[in-house]
């Protein structure tokens, strides 16, 4: 009984810690970037496409170079140059879109 209570408390603490991880938009805000950095014309109703990210991050080739040691390289593969936000979510936990079909041990920031 006592042990179970600790487990429940432990889980609550753990989920709290995960929820407290700042999401991508907040990490950009912390570097002084406003909403309009990603939301063109500050319009939040339109989807954020990769050209918005590439204004600052250069190109898929540049991203592939940054993660060239990661296997598989999330920025260079047969799945193609998708919108960055298929993996990097703005205001929620990011995902690994590859894992709709694979089981790669990747972690998307
Ligand atoms: C680093 C890029 C980035 C920044 C900066 C950013 N957003 Fe977003 N925003 C996104 C993305 C990507 C989506 C699409 C949904 C998602 O991935 O969470 C989105 C979606 C939204 C939506 C649609 C509803 C939703 O959550 O899906 C709203 C509203 C929004 N953002 C508000 C804001 C506001 C307000 C700011 C500034 C305080 C901001 N965003 C800054 C990337 C960003
Ligand atoms: C106004 C410029 C700007 C825009 C637009 C922008 N970023 Fe960034 N981003 C930065 C800077 C600066 C850093 C910190 C230095 C670095 O890691 O390149 C960064 C860091 C990151 C990081 C790694 C570090 C972290 O804190 O997460 C990811 C992932 C990232 N950006 C993804 C995106 C995605 C996806 C988009 C589009 C939705 C985007 N960025 C739009 C400037 C920008
Ligand atoms: C298929 C999913 C996926 C897509 C699409 C994707 N990324 Fe990533 N990204 C990742 C993963 C996974 C990592 C972490 C790799 C690692 O383990 O270091 C990452 C890391 C990053 C980093 C940090 C690199 C570093 O030096 O640590 C940046 C910046 C970034 N991505 C930007 C982008 C941008 C910009 C785009 C769109 C042009 C994009 N990503 C598209 C999955 C993705
Ligand atoms: C719609 C399903 C689908 C998605 C999404 C997908 N793949 Fe694949 N992938 C396949 C299929 C099918 C094969 C070929 C069969 C095999 O070898 O598993 C394959 C093969 C591969 C291979 C070579 C075989 C292996 O498993 O080592 C790599 C590497 C790979 N994919 C990486 C990725 C990466 C990285 C992503 C995300 C950016 C991704 N895939 C997204 C379906 C998919």
Image (spheres, rainbow, N blue to C red):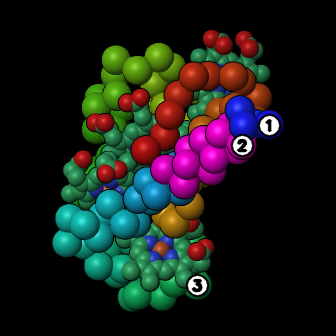
What residue is pinned by disc 3? 45
Task: Check whether the beta carbons of the residues at disc 2 and disc 1 lie within 8 A of each other.
Answer: yes
- Secondary structure under tag 1 reads loop
Give residue 14's position: percent from left, percent from top: 56, 44
Q: Main secondary structure of the magenta part?
A: helix
| Residue 46 placement, left or right of 25 | right
Give residue 100's position: percent from left, percent from top: 75, 35
Mark 2 vs mark 3: which is more N-terminal?
2
Mark 3 vs mark 1: which is more N-terminal?
1
Res 5 label: 2
What residue is pinned by disc 1? 1
For the point 50% across and 34% down, which residue is it?
107
Q: Is residue 82 positioned above or below 78 on the image?
A: below
Q: What is the magenta range?
A: 5-17
Q: Between marks 2 and 1, how big is the CA–CA gap?
A: 6 Å
Q: Between marks 3 and 1, how big is the CA–CA gap?
A: 49 Å
Quarter holding the C terminus is top left
């Amino acid at each position: 009984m006592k042990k179970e209570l600790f487990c429940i408390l432990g889980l609550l603490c753990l989920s709290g810690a995960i929820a407290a991880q700042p999401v991508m938009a907040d990490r950009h805000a912390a570097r002084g970037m406003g909403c309009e950095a990603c939301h063109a014309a500050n319009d939040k109703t339109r989807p954020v496409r990769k050209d918005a990210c590439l204004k600052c991050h250069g190109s898929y080739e540049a991203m592939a170079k940054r993660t060239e040691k990661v296997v598989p390289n999330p920025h260079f593969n047969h799945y193609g140059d998708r919108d960055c936000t298929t993996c990097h979510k703005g205001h929620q936990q990011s995902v690994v879109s590859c894992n709709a079909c694979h089981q790669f041990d990747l972690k998307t920031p």
